[in-house]
Image (cartoon, rainbow, N blue to C red):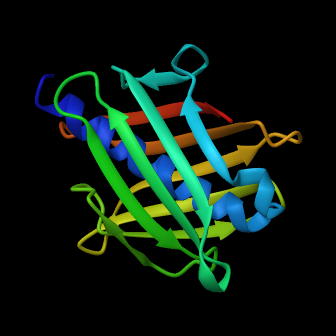
Amino acid sequence: MHTRAPKMVLALVATTLIAFASNAAAQEPTAMVGTWKLNIAKSKFTPGPPPKAMTIVYTPASEGRTTIVVDVTPAEGAALHWEATVADDGKDAPVKGNPNADSISSKRLDARNGTTTWKKDGKVTATNTRKLSADGKTLTITTKQTTADGKPRTDVQVLEK
């Protein structure tokens, strides 16, 4: 479990990262701008363990893109840091600093819902669906992936502004 836990957290954070970028294009710029924190008590990690902490900072970028910076403290191991700048156009964009994904793509379904796909070397490593609350203060991300030992993993992450 000790060697798999950091990989599961990496995937968790990777999927969270793109969720913010995708929803950003769907909302007024002020709805997503700022700092978001994982509410561990309201989130569910199956199987666990959850990270100790996670913070995501969203800022608008040029040409309708979104820059996302993620800092996470996993249950075990060193703190992690990722960055990506993406558009909500369904096209792959590069990821910096994530060993489990080298590209991400995002599609908006409507003003508060979207999907995201993470890939490593062209192979899908995780998918998620996300929903931003009507008041813009809560983002719920449901992530589906496979653990390092081949078992299904589903996480429901609740992030608050």
112 shown above or below 109: above
Task: Look at the image and tell me in which quarter the C terminus lies.
Answer: top right
- Lateral position of residue 60 relative to residue 95, left or right: right
* Residue toward you, 108 or 78: 78
Expressed as whole percent of the image width and height from the top left, the position of residue 53 reads 41, 26
Residue at 64%, 86% in the rendered image: 63
Expressed as whole percent of the image width and height from the top left, the position of residue 143 reads 50, 43
Q: Quadrant of residue 147?
A: top left
Task: Look at the image and tell me in which quarter the N terminus lies.
Answer: top left
Residue 147 visible within the image: no
- Lateral position of residue 99 relative to residue 123, left or right: left
Residue at 61%, 33% in the rendered image: 159
Residue 5 visible within the image: yes
Q: Residue furthest left?
A: 3
* Residue toward you, 1 or 137: 137
- Lateral position of residue 39 relative to residue 97, left or right: right
143 shown above or below 90: above
